[in-house]
Image: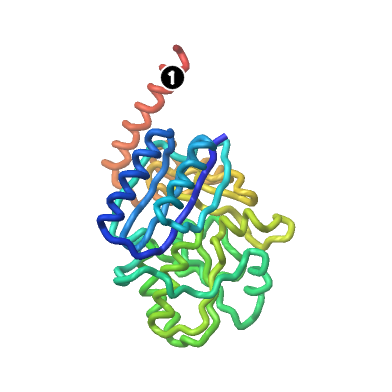
Amino acid sequence: MHKILSFYEFCDLSLDKVENNRSKIFNTSKKDSILGTVILSTEGINGTVSGPSNSIDKLNKLLKDLGYNCNTKVSESQKKPFKRLKVKIQKEIVTFMDLGKSAKNTGTFISPEDWDDFISNEDVKLIDVRNFYETVIGKFPKSIDPNTQTFTDFINYIDENLSVDKNQKIAMYCTGGIRCEKASSYMKDIGFKNVFQLEGGIINYLNSVEKENGSWDGECFVFDERVSLIYNSEVGNFELCHGCRNPIDNDDKKSIYFEEGVSCPNCINVRSNEQNEKSRQRQAQIIFTRNRKEKL
């Protein structure tokens, strides 16, 4: 069983402090067999890692000792979520735009337990802040999909589609909550008055609300080897296409356009023959290595 720790916090730090924190987090994680990704910045910290239970507890304590008061979520998985460890410094802990300050002017948080009642109000416009390849496998009913390819595209959606009425009630949700904090802070800075967001994101909702009482429909895409989650953070039914990195299910794998390790219905007309051939060579190496291990 793999213990998983997801965390983030917006806070103002000096670059020297960030560099010092990175060194301590990397050394501790490497020593204690922790895998995953941690992003540090002068605006805060963001990460999801996994490892032995005592190692994750030790890292969680280190984060507190370093002064982070993170929004943390702990879960477990039979499937190994990560293959390697990355602890890096970036300009932003989630790429959106350089606000020049931490995203602290956020919208009002709505708890998972109150979320369904709140979004059922007719005067609330519900927005999915995630990208199109995430929204296609699961969402809250009646939510609006901005059809963005990257989070930075959401800025244009705000300016072009939402700014016409900055007094309207807008509720937003994303995977873990961090993108909503960035987006809602930007919206309030430019004059939006009634911005709300799901506290802790979809993951917190799926861990807090029972399936028979919840409105979430489908699965939640996550950026690790689990690919998708359902209620109680159980691993879902999706895998990643190695050609386009989009989620695919069993129906996609039955398609004539699916080729293991190469392509799927989402990318059959997008990737070049050269790209597909490189993927075929890579898949052949994977199969060769797999067969060799089975014979040993």
Number of numbered tags placed on the structure image: 1
Relative image position of residue 247 (x, y in whole percent): 48, 49
Name, please, the residue furthest toward the front: 65
Is residue 218 toward the left or the right of residue 264 in the image? Answer: right
Identified by mark 1, the residue type is Asn
- Figure quadrant of the N terminus: top right
Within 10 angstroms of label 1, few (less than 14), some, or many (20 or more) residues? few
Is residue 256 something that shows in the picture?
no
Relative image position of residue 20 (x, y in whole percent): 29, 49
Q: In this view, does 234 lie above or below 154?
A: above
- Which residue is painted at 47% across and 87% down in the image? 165
Residue bearing mark 1: 291
Name, please, the residue furthest toward the right: 212
Relative image position of residue 239 (x, y in whole percent): 50, 43
Is residue 134 toward the left or the right of residue 285 in the image? Answer: right
- Which residue is painted at 52% across and 58% down in the image? 136
Location of residue 208 by image quarter: bottom right
Please state which of residues 254 and 82 is positioned toward the viewer in this rendering.
82
SS label for mark 1 = helix
Relative image position of residue 18 (x, y in whole percent): 30, 54
Is residue 275 toward the left or the right of residue 194 in the image? Answer: left
- Figure quadrant of the C terminus: top left
Q: Which colour scheme is used?
A: rainbow
- Which residue is painted at 63% across and 60% down in the image? 216
Please state which of residues 227 and 90 is positioned toward the viewer in this rendering.
90
Please state which of residues 276 and 91 is positioned toward the viewer in this rendering.
91
